[in-house]
Image (cartoon, helix red, strand yellow):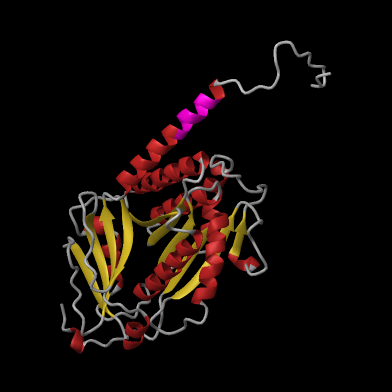
Amino acid sequence: MNNPQNAALVANSERDEITIYAVGGAGINLGLKLQNAMRGRTASIFGRVRVVFADTSRSNVTAAVPESDCYIMKGCDGAGKKRDEHAQLIIERTPEILLKFKPTKHNIVIGSAGGGSGSVLGPSIVSQLLAKGEAVTAITIGSTATLKDAENTLNTLKSYEGAVRMRERPVGLTYLENSHELSRAKIDERVIQFVTCMAVLFSGNNAELDSQDLHNWRDFHRVTSFGPRLAFLDIVGGEREVNMSDDRVLISVATLSAQDRDSAIHGATPEYQAVGYVSPDAKEAHEPLPIHFMLFDGVFRPIVDRLSELVTRLKDEAEARRASSSSVLSSHDRVESNGLVL
């Protein structure tokens, strides 16, 4: 590696462009918050972020969503958490979405895993981007509030892995799950923080970190012993030691550091690491440095096992309830032709 002391901290005056595909109701709500959070971030330390929106209903589309940045599927009015309601139509229309909102150098897909539209739009757009050879990462928000939420979340995660297998390219996916500990407000905050960090990573203005470095970090099957797979994307800042366990295998890392900081990962050694050096402005804005963008294997297996067990248990409980009679009618009641009991 070249000595960072000899490197220009701002590589280009131009900024790379990032497209955020905010899909479904939850995705649109998050997209609007991201739009506000990224507004005014014009410094060269940030990539140019454009948020675009796609859904099967206008119910979450407010006046704050420009018509030019919005794709609503005709002939639909939401999916009501029923993932197969418009699935085939979504698959057919995904190329239209990418024709209207052309992919850029870096792309991030954001939506819920527990709903009906975003949980299909998200994996479908990711799959199409992979097929086109585009750079993509994703964020999805799961839920176990109801049986339907849990079942949708489980099948959405499986859909992302299905896209990876079909396209034979890896995907870094950040998974957040609504819970008592992780409220909707906290999730929104984390997503904004995540995208802000990604906007710095993908700015094109980090010394010694070029497009090929990021390509190899993301398409890690090119430079490591790991084949294409669905990888868990986590961001760890500062000198905090990485919490490793048997189900967390570190694959590859992209690191943003300052000239005077150690870029090593404490507690773990990846097969691949690309390091870039940020400008002094970024150093002040994004303490603590270094920031590690980490791709892990093994994280989703226990998540899927937990969701599968929960779905099975909830279905068994529902079946037991159906088997017990809860009717208020007795065999002696006379029901008239219109349903009345007189």
Q: Is residue 332 above or below residue 204?
A: above
Horizontal side of 74 relative to 179 (left or right) equals right
Location of residue 265 in the rendering, given as x and y in whole percent from the top left corner = 19, 68
Does the stretch in magenta take in 319? Answer: yes
Along the viewing direction, whichever of 40 and 16 lies nearer the viewer: 40
Q: Is residue 107 visible?
A: yes
Looking at this rendering, what residue extends furthest in the right direction?
Answer: 342
Looking at this rendering, what residue extends furthest in the top direction?
Answer: 332
Residue at 44% over, 36% down: 311
Q: Quadrant of residue 275?
A: bottom left
Main secondary structure of the magenta stretch = helix
Q: Is residue 107 above or below residue 176?
A: below
Q: Quadrant of residue 250?
A: bottom left
Along the viewing direction, whichever of 7 and 154 lies nearer the viewer: 154
Does the stretch in magenta take in 171? Answer: no
Horizontal side of 338 relative to 124 (left or right) equals right
How many marks the image carries: the answer is 0
Residue at 25% over, 65% down: 253
Along the viewing direction, whichever of 208 and 325 lies nearer the viewer: 325
Location of residue 26 in the rendering, given as x and y in whole percent from the top left corner = 54, 57
Q: Is residue 9 above or below residue 182?
A: below
Along the viewing direction, whichever of 135 and 26 lies nearer the viewer: 26
Residue at 55% over, 46% down: 116
Location of residue 257 in the rendering, given as x and y in whole percent from the top left corner = 26, 78
Q: Which residues are magenta?
A: 314-321
Location of residue 164 in the rendering, given as x and y in whole percent from the top left corner = 35, 48
Residue at 50% over, 48% down: 114
Horizontal side of 320 relative to 3 (left or right) equals right
Q: Is residue 192 above or below residue 124?
A: below
Q: Quadrant of the C terminus?
A: top right
Q: Is residue 170 visible?
A: no
